[in-house]
Amino acid sequence: MEVTRLAAEVGSRSLHRALLGAFEGPYSLGVARDEASSKAVLLLMVPQDVTAVFPTRIEVAGESVAVIVRRDFKQPVPFHSEKSG
């Protein structure tokens, strides 16, 4: 699958649910290009302590797409600026 086509599909709620299953913690899902084949892959990042098992391939728009799981995601901390008086 082309990177631009997969990028257009990655926002689909049903794709997220199919990939994450019952997992409800923080994560990041994006699109990358496999260096060996130049095919688009899904890049799922979850925190290091997550023990959930995720699929290694998933069907997207009728095509099988590889899923790479990285366990080094750190949830962003909201930025709050203090106003000085």
Image: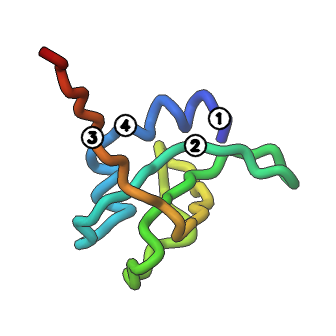
Residue at image mark 2: 31
Is residue 33 positioned above or below 27 on the image? above
Lower position in the chain sequence, tag 4 or tag 3: 4
Secondary structure state at the residue bearing disc 3: loop
Identify which amino acid the numbered label 1 is placed on: Val
Residue at left offset 42%, top offset 51%: 28
Along the polypeptide, which appears first: circle 4 or circle 1? Answer: 1
Residue at 33% x, 40% y is 12
For badge 2, the amino acid type reads: Val
Q: Disc 2 on helix, strand or loop?
A: strand
- Residue behind mark 4: 11
The total number of labels drawn is: 4
Please provide percent x and percent y for residue 18. 33, 61
| Image: 81 above or below 12 | above
Q: Residues within 10 Å of mark 3 (few under 14, many from 20)?
A: few
Assess whether mark 2 and mark 1 are in contact (beta carbons under 8 angstroms): yes
Give the percent coordinates (x, y) of residue 63.
Answer: 56, 50
Q: Which residue is mark 1?
A: 3
> Which coloring applies here?
rainbow
The residue at which mark 3 appears reads as: 78
- View extreme (left): residue: 85
